[in-house]
Image: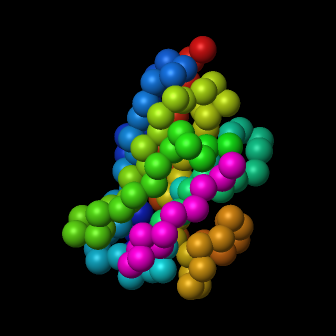
Amino acid sequence: QEQLVESGGGLVQAGDSLRLSCAASGPFSRYAMAWFRQAPGKDREFVAAITWIGGATYYARSVKDRFTVSRDRTKNTSYLQMNGLKPEDAHIYFCAAPWGSTATMNPSDYDIWGQGTQVAVSS
């Protein structure tokens, strides 16, 4: 069973940048890798996704033009570059792999999840 491990979270000031990483435990064989985020008491929400072979990217409207998702297939790792962070971006960020051949915005379509990494943004 593949495992995903996120890293790179932390506390930053509004306007700063962070880069999150998501490393798979071995050769990554899923169709895509996605990023979700979750605030306490809220549903998990889609942030971005990238298809593993083709590199097509998808973004939530709230982060488009500020966040960039990428992947390094040689390292089995995806990255989420977050620029211009806002206080409302403060969440726990998770990476996930879908069980099917689509990269959707629905968390139910993903069956492998990392443990999450906390991002805090001070105003």
Q: In the figure, is residue 75 to the left or right of 98?
A: left
Q: Position of residue 41 (x, y in %)?
A: 77, 41
Work out whether residue 31 or residue 1 is closer to the camera in this orientation and state it.
31
Q: Residue at x 29, y 77 (%)?
A: 27
Instruction: Please say if 92 is above or below 2.
Output: above
Q: Residue at x 45, y 24 (%)?
A: 16
* Residue 89 horizontal/vertical position (percent): 61, 34
Between residues 111 and 46, which one lies in front from this camera angle? Answer: 46
Which residue is pictured at 68% across the width and 65% down the height?
Answer: 105
Tell me: 12 left or right of 25: right
Direction left: furthest residue: 74
For the N terminus, the quadrant is bottom left
Residue range (magenta): 51-61
Nearer-the-camera pick, 57 or 77: 57
Indicate how the structure is coloured in the image. rainbow
Task: Name which quarter of the figure residue 63 lies in.
Answer: top right
State the quadrant of the C terminus.
top right
Evaluate whether residue 44 shows in this view.
yes
Q: Residue at x 50, y 58 (%)?
A: 95
